[in-house]
């Protein structure tokens, strides 16, 4: 059986992938890369091998990857330095003799600098290109927007404000649950047939949903009438600035909302369903779990 290493295993996605692997294969096959070993004590107790390392520490990556067959590479969250960090991971994997890298990229249509999310897109695109040119076997999992982000974009006080206020227009998004994405990743890692090698998969949900529809769903669940207001970008930025929201978060919310309005995340595919072997969890089912009293 292949030795599999999951990076970022104490973060939300890496943790979910590791938990999914533990349900499907022996712990002795699973390795994880973490920055703080203490945070991985739970996995260590289950028999998972812990490696301490950092995307910025090349030597630590080479050391961790020795003897590993497959690496699940969670994209880093240091946007400014991410492209170089990802280069480190790919180069270290090659030096250490890793056979297959599975990379968590992103769903998109527009790959030019005109996209409202160019600030996150650049490093994903450069990493995909790096992997394709590396000589390593690779799989690119282009994740759709996580359904888990809906309550964050809607606002933690939604049932008090009763308004979803975003510059997302009438755009639809094929949301998918993070745990479904993680399970799909685990299935790719455990496959020995080669059917995922040197291919890209657009892992989006099986339905496109607008924010107006989300407001209706939440209204139905809670009995509280929620309205969606499609703000202009300047209005949105001014409102959040007045509320004291940090500029970097305003830029993040505005960028992804504009991309949403432009249809960047609307593409519905069956690739997540196919890899899972079942229907992904629907937005309505997920929202029921969040908002049902």
Image (tube, rainbow, N blue to C red):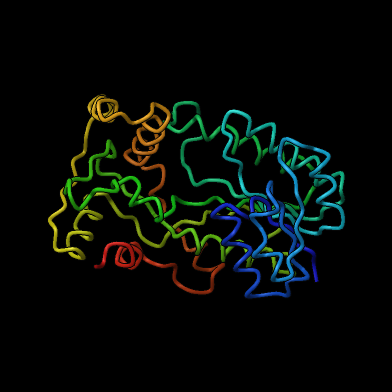
Whether 239 is drawn above or below 32: the answer is above
Camera-side residue of 152 and 280: 152
Camera-side residue of 178 and 135: 178
Residue 58 lies in quadrant: top right
Which residue corresponds to the image point at 72% horizontal and 43% vertical from the top-left?
131
| Quadrant of the rendering where the N terminus is positioned | bottom right
How many labels were placed on the picture?
A: 0
Which residue corresponds to the image point at 35% horizontal and 47% vertical from the top-left?
152
Camera-side residue of 138 and 284: 284
Residue 270, given in percent of the width and then of the height, sits at: 47, 63
Whether 193 is drawn above or below 68: the answer is below
Which residue corresponds to the image point at 45% horizontal and 33% vertical from the top-left?
117
Residue 54, given in percent of the width and then of the height, sits at: 72, 41
**112 relative position to 48: left or right:** left
Residue 138, given in percent of the width and then of the height, sits at: 71, 52
**75 relative position to 202: left or right:** right
Which residue corresponds to the image point at 69% horizontal and 46% vertical from the top-left?
35
């Amino acid at each position: 059986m292949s030795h599999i290493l999951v990076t970022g295993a104490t973060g939300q996605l890496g943790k979910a992938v590791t938990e999914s692997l533990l349900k499907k294969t022996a712990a002795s096959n699973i390795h994880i890369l973490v920055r703080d070993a203490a945070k991985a004590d739970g996995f260590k107790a289950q028999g998972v091998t812990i490696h301490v390392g950092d995307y910025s520490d090349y030597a630590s990556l080479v050391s961790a990857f020795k003897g590993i067959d497959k690496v699940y590479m969670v994209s880093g969250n240091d946007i400014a330095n991410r492209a170089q960090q990802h280069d480190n991971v790919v180069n270290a994997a090659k030096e250490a003799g890793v056979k297959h890298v599975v990379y968590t990229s992103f769903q998109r249509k527009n790959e030019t600098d005109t996209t409202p999310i160019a600030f996150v897109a650049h490093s994903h695109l450069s990493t995909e290109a790096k992997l394709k040119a590396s000589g390593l076997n690779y799989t690119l999992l282009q994740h759709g927007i996580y359904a888990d982000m809906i309550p964050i974009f809607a606002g933690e006080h939604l049932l008090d404000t009763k308004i979803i206020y975003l510059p997302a227009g009438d755009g639809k998004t094929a949301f998918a649950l993070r745990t479904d994405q993680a399970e799909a990743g685990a299935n790719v890692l455990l496959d020995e047939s080669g059917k995922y090698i040197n291919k890209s998969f657009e892992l989006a949900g099986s339905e496109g949903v607008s924010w107006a529809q989300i407001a209706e769903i939440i209204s139905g669940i809670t009995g509280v009438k929620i309205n969606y207001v499609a703000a202009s970008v300047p209005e949105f930025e001014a409102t959040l600035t007045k509320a004291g929201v940090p500029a970097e978060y305003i830029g993040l919310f505005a960028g992804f909302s504009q991309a949403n309005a432009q249809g960047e995340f609307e593409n519905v595919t069956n690739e997540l369903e196919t890899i899972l072997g079942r229907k992904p969890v629907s937005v309505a089912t997920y929202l029921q779990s969040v908002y049902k009293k």
